[in-house]
């Protein structure tokens, strides 16, 4: 989950693996530090997302597809971290592959950003927020209370996105 992102973004290699169809358009991403990255053959498509701990919740979302939307961010192992935080011990999450995050859910679908529950620890402990798609844990989780963000069934890293709204309409989606 990324409340700092305007749009939903999916890694283009995942889009290929899923054989997504849509419209190919050029677009530019404004990233951290004002860096702009252009893509001549970006893909806009739709995918279904679901809460992996509660498969009864699904939602179709629009995604812009380009390489590495979350950079090299890789979610840490929650099962090895949660014993350190008793206020978060009962939060269940599946283990993830040791691979970079491939999907960012931004503010294009604001109802997915709604907080259903929050858990707060002491001043130097992480907090957790439950969204419709699952839990995210924010704050110091690494050695020496490093500010690091972990993903349970979603990720937050205020990273980017500014896409020309004229290219982002339902009329342009063919899938």
Image (cartoon, rainbow, N blue to C red):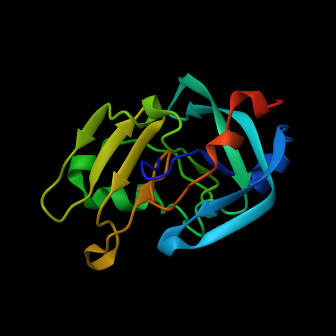
Where, quadrant-wise, is the C terminus in this rendering?
top right
Q: Is residue 39 above or below residue 60?
A: below
From the viewer's side, name the closer residue of 122 and 167.
167
Q: Residue furthest front?
A: 166
Residue occupying the point 76% across, 50% down: 14
* Residue 33: x %, y % from top left: 48, 74
Residue at image location 48% in from the left, 63% down from the top: 76
Q: Name the foreground residue: 52 vs 154.
A: 154
Task: Tell which of 30 and 10 is nearer to you.
Answer: 30
Residue 125's x, y, as percent? 21, 61
Looking at the image, the residue that sits furthest to the bottom is: 144
Where residue 37 appears, as percent x and y from the top left, is: 67, 68
**Which residue ends up furthest to the left in the rendered image?**
123
Report the side of 121 relative to 90 (left or right): left
Q: Is residue 89 visible?
A: no
Q: Is residue 149 above or below residue 23?
A: below
């Amino acid at each position: 989950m990324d409340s700092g992102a305007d749009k939903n973004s999916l890694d283009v290699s995942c889009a290929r693996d899923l054989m997504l169809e849509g419209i190919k358009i050029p677009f530019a991403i404004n990233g951290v530090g004002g860096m702009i990255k252009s893509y001549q053959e970006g893909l806009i498509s739709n995918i279904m997302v679901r809460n992996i701990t509660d498969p009864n919740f699904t939602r179709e979302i629009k995604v812009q597809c380009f390489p590495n939307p979350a950079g090299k961010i890789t979610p840490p192992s929650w099962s090895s971290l949660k014993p350190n935080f008793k206020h978060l011990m009962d939060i269940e999450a599946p283990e993830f592959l040791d691979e970079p995050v491939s999907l960012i859910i931004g503010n294009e679908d604001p109802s997915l950003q709604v907080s259903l529950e929050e858990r707060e620890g002491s001043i130097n402990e992480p907090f957790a927020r439950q969204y419709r798609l699952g839990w995210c844990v924010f704050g110091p989780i690494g050695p020496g209370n490093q500010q690091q963000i972990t993903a349970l069934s979603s990720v937050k890293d205020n990273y980017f996105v500014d896409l020309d709204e004229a290219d982002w309409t339902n009329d342009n989606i063919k899938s």
